[in-house]
Amino acid sequence: MAAGTDVLTPPAPAHRRPKATRRARDERRLAYLLCAPAVVVMLAVTAYPILYAVWLSLQRADLRFPAASAFVGLANYLTVLRSGLWWQAVANTLIITVVSVAIELVFGMAIALVMHRALIGRTAVRTAVLIPYGIITVVAAFSWRFAWTPSLGYLPRWLHLNGDPLTAHASSLAIIILAEVWKTTPFMSLLLLAGLALVSNELLEAARVDGATAWQRFTNVILPVMKPAILVAVLFRVMDAFRIFDNIFILTQGSNSTQSVSILGYDQLFVGLNLGIGSAMSVLIFVMIAIIGFGFIKGFGAAAPGMDTGR
Amino acid sequence: MSASGQKRALWGLADIVVIALALVPVLWIVSLSLKTPATLTDGAFFPNHPSFSNYRGIFHTTLFTRSFLNSIGIAVITTVVAVILAAMAAYAVARLDFRGKRLLVGASLVVAIFPLISLVSPIFKLWLKLHLYDTWPGLILPYLTFSLPLAIYTLSAFFREIPWELEQAAQIDGATPFQAFVRVIAPLAAPGVFTTAILVFIFAWNEFLFAISLTSTDAARTVPAALAFFTGSSQFEQPTGSIAAAAVVVTIPIVLLVLAFQRRIVAGLTAGAVKG
């Protein structure tokens, strides 16, 4: 077969060089053609709207008083930044993000270890944890809401609770965090499981022979190898938790001061119909997310997935 | 020997705890959906006299049946289009050499972490102007945008595992790069494409913020949005049972996907993310 192709291939190296560069050019053109549709769609629905949001945020744009629209500079931002409601929402969002991601990291690691070690029922465990991942967040949130509602649910009865936990601030936040943790821990644990697969058994065995306890093996052998996987998982979950919307919308509608920044922005836009203020919030949320992401990548050296495509 | 048996039992117990925690809220919503108005408030975890009346009820309301059709149509179209566009881009990212590759990958990472709320109001205004508000394409377009980054990552991770040599061999045999793509790489890439399709479908099936913001009637309202506005099969009835039944119906496709393709979903979720 090799002989056959040799006959067909022009033997003179002089011919090959221009061919190679033409192929490189063809390759580049094909690459742009292949990427163009995806890039156009992504830009059309993000770049233009975010610029439009910036522009809207500089206007007085209240749909209830369309005649009063005018350019107001940074006035909307000042209004937002001086509002107690905004800072309450920022505080709620940060609490929910930090607490739920911390819990998820611990539980996610535990579940990853269980899935990694599972001798019996490995498939059953993996299938079971994919259910929370795949289920519609709104559906799960309804399940939690009904479970905690005193007249309907089993949880107040089991826990001997008096009153409705979804009508008080702290208990509502706790239930929101619970719903968030239940829904997203599987994602965390699967990313960690993939990291766990990179830990070599010989290394663990060597540590065991040297007399390391299980905890020492975990902190000194497993964790360092898993660091990149942990950073990626935490980065993704922090970004995602910061956008929390569905769970709160169904569980409390943001009542008893449980609004997240996304819920507050939504209320301004679609309940208050104040596009100017709502857009200012939208831009501020975008900036906060960008700062968090940038901080992660610079501060912890978290390699964003896909950034290593150079390979 | 008995120590290892004990260990086994402990890990087995851990398995059971994890499975129970994952399934309890699902079983609870199933249980609620089987209760009747008379037993709804008895607080029992399992229904005493299971009844399918809630299911009969929701399939008699267009509110649910229309939104169910909308959900299926929008999620399927999003999945097909996203996978095609992402496969093209991922092929370029994984196999071809071109300037701007890092920019493309970085930009789609930005899209992946974009706070959706920041885009809702401008898209809402824009869609009103373009007559996309409350239509299928009006939801499909943003769903494409936000599933493309995930799809491109996952697919390019799968594509990188495909043996290069086969493509080169095809090109040496006279195939153009495009022919090499269609004839050689595409069949090898099918498993990755399939996995990506499942992940995109789950995303589109789940999405809520755009679904409530960019729709106003059952012309395009998907099930998650419809659930939030549910009023029960008659206006005098508590909607809890209907919500629970509808919730169970829309969870069934997800459960089937998970049961059938557990291995693929795990591979897909971890494909793009581990190589840090």
Image (cartoon, coloured by chain):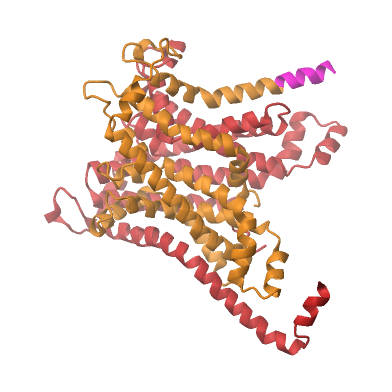
Chain colours: A red, B orange
The structure residue drawn at horizontal position 58% and vertical position 30%, both measured from the top left corner, is: A128
The structure residue drawn at horizontal position 46% and vertical position 44%, both measured from the top left corner, is: B203
Q: Is residue B25 visible?
A: yes
- Vertical relation: A78 (above or below) A126: below
Which region of the structure is painted magenta? B1-10
- Vertical relation: B111 (above or below) A224: below
Q: Image quarter for residue A185?
A: top right
Q: Position of residue B264 (x, y in %)?
A: 61, 43
* Figure disc tally: 0
Split into 4 quadrants, where in the image is the N terminus of chain B? top right
- Vertical relation: B148 (above or below) B97: above
| Front position in the image: A272 or A122 | A122
Q: Position of residue A266 (x, y in %)?
A: 30, 43
Q: Position of residue A113 (x, y in %)?
A: 68, 32
Main SS, magenta residues = helix
Q: Position of residue B82 (x, y in %)?
A: 47, 55
The structure residue drawn at horizontal position 40% and vertical position 34%, both measured from the top left corner, is: A138
Q: Which residue of the protein is positioned furthest toward the right in this rendering?
A: A209
Q: Is residue B96 visible?
A: no
